[in-house]
Image (tube, grey):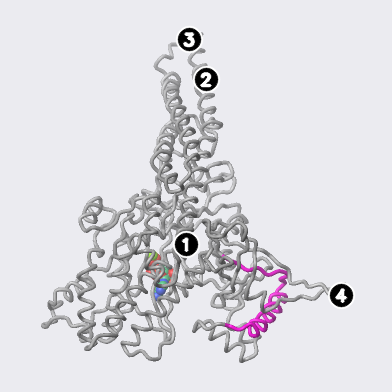
Amino acid sequence: MPNVTEFFGTNVFNESVMKERLPAETFELVQRAIHNNKRLDLATAAIVANAMKDWAIEKGATHYTHWFQPMTGVTAEKHDSFICPKKDGNIIMDFSGKELVQGETDASSFPSGGLRATFEARGYTAWDPTSFAFLKEGVLCIPTAFCSYSGEALDKKTPLLRSMEAINKQALRVLKLFGNEDVTAVKTTVGPEQEYFLIDKDVYLARKDLVYTGRTLFGAMPPKGQELDDHYFGTIKSRVKAFMTEVDTELWKLGVTSKTEHNEAAPAQHELAPVFATANIAVDHNQITMELLQRIAKKHDLICLLHEKPFEGVNGSGKHDNWSISTSTGVNLLNPGETPYENAQFLLFLCAVIKAADEYQDLLRISIASAANDHRLGALEAPPAIVSMFLGDELSEILEAIKKDEPYGVKEKETLKVGVHVLPKFPKDTTDRNRTAPLAFTGNKFEFRMLGSSDSVSEPNVVLNTAVAESLRLFADELEAAEDFNTALHDLIRKTVEKHDRIIFNGNCYDEAWVKEAAARGLSNLETTPDALPHLLDKKNVELFATHKIYTENELKSRLEILLENYCHILNIEAKTMADMARKDILPAVSRYIVDLAEAVSVGNVIGEDLRDSFEAVTAKELTALKATAFGELTLLEKATAKAKEIEASAERAVYYKNSVIPVMEALRKTVDTMETLTCEDYWPMPNYGELLFGVM
Ligand code: ADP
Ligand code: MG
């Protein structure tokens, strides 16, 4: 392989390219835009656009696109070529500042949740200069935000940028109180760990459920699953290795810092983690990563499944969102530091996260809610739907000592005073033992572990940023007004811990007992997506987003509508796919097998052999009974699906799918899976779990 340092970022219009190609003062202005959130004027944008175009054309590009992230969850692009006709019949290649900064797109087919009136189908894309432009398949991609004519957010990037601005503003207020005059900006950093499955393409294509829904709707477990733990961190198979090598190479060219790759717990499951980056860049990079994983897999005759629960009986896939806050001077605010002063500041930021997680548990839950993720949460493989925080024993004891104004540890004789005492270090290995916690402190960052593998990581970070910004806003208000900063700080931390420590739980979140305890603590437990979503419009949540100018109430309503509709669409497709497979493939196959078994029995009768209790007769009888049950369930499923379609209101329809469609789907699956275990493989109309999970060599 060529030297990675030489080709890393070669497809990115990054700072070093800009430095080389832009006039010094233009480069300076772009730097300010990137690092200090300053706006670029149109004249500067024109210079940048021209340099960008020349660079892209030199690398073989003919088109550019405003690359954006509509509410569909995947990225969107509309390609425009650089060509500009001249009067003499020739063309020049042109790209103006205006074309770089703003795009207009017919957005009528993107979900808007009713935000965009039908007469106003235009949507606008606006350049995000903080995320570098890049070249993908010969197209210059410009990361943009996407909004309506009247400025309402129609995408996943706009709110993220707004939330980053909100936490920047409030954190700067707090940092000033600690005397950090040199800090000019605060940014959140994100490192998403991406899980996925890789299966053989031919096997995939032979399964309607995978093709239409991304997950298996039927499938009996093979004799072996993940019980031996022999896949986790195991040797990577050569076909998978070749795939990963290509993924890394392409990601590196795009400046994505792909770092760690390993096999995961389930057979055919893998993980890829990058080195963390600024939140909006990390979100963009994760979208690129998901796209490349899927595209490159096909080149290797593989299919990358990003679905949260492609297979029942083995673990599903999630995405750990590692999140922290750092300053323009390079300080990680969730790193305890070495001195009492740094420790006090750390404790305050820690309290901001504790308060945020407790007050906006529901929003954190909503931010990761989807039909697919409902299969994982609470299924003893991922954190439950209850949001709680893990801090580790040491840190929890410190907070307890502060709360009770008690001495801490063996060495301390006097009570622990914020801003006076030095805290012990919290090495990662003492803070990271608990893998069951939804939100875990891991030494110098939080790891939010409820995310689904296929979702954009934007929304969870919007909620984290905004909820923490709100804590910091209230902290700053209080501390700015205080007469004695240190006393006020100490009291504030003590008060916050006292009020919000119910959210801290260091035990096993997969334990049944925790569900009861959480209820006793008054923590919210929104088990499914239809339970969770409507809380988006709870008064406190509307107020939070309005205060920090993240979402207007209208934007929230539109998002809720999109999320509910999406949930219903997914269930409708799944139910219809299931019915199709049962009616057209599975029941006919079982029927054929029964006929053949019965024929064997009658042949026995003819030749005088008594086959009444034989394998053939018993199996035929069992399958006949199961077939009747399955047919009954199929009929119920078809009726329930038709009825769901008639329900007008999306919230009500979502609840109907949850209560009346999903249970029938589960029952039908159970019957079919039992039939599969009894049916001769030659008759079964699709590849089985064994081939799906163990088929890639
Ligand atoms: P694991 O969770 O598998 O043990 P690590 O904890 O080492 O792995 O890292 C997981 C992810 O956390 C990586 O993507 C890493 O870059 C990211 N990370 C590390 N520090 C930070 C930080 N300050 N902010 C955000 N993400 C971080
Ligand atoms: Mg992790």
Q: Nearer the viewer, mark 2 or mark 4?
A: 4
Q: Above or below — where is 623 with respect to 244?
A: above
- The answer to whether the beta carbon of the residue marked 3 is less than 8 Å from any atom of ligand 2 is no
- The answer to whether the beta carbon of the residue marked 1 is less than 8 Å from any atom of ligand 1 is no
Residue type at mark 1 is: Asn
Split into quadrants, the picture shows ligand 2 in the one at bottom left
Residue 496, image x, y percentages: 23, 73
Q: Where are the magenta residues, as a range?
A: 40-68
Residue 288, image x, y percentages: 56, 65
Q: Above or below — where is 260 with respect to 97?
A: above
Alpha-carbon distance for marks 2 and 3?
15 Å
* Quarter of the figure with the N terminus: bottom right
Q: Nearer the viewer, mark 2 or mark 3?
A: 2
Q: Which residue is mark 4?
A: 87
Q: Label 1: few (<14), some or many (≥20) within 10 Å?
A: some
Q: Nearer the viewer, mark 2 or mark 1?
A: 1
- The answer to whether the beta carbon of the residue marked 2 is less than 8 Å from any atom of ligand 2 is no
Q: Which residue is mark 1?
A: 554
Q: Which residue is mark 3?
A: 605
Q: Nearer the viewer, mark 1 or mark 3?
A: 1
Sequence order check, earlier mark of 4 and 1: 4
Q: Which residue is mark 2?
A: 595
Residue 502, image x, y percentages: 22, 64
SS class, disc 3: helix
Residue type at mark 4 is: Lys
Q: Toward the viewer: 647 or 302?
A: 647
Alpha-carbon distance for marks 1 and 3?
74 Å
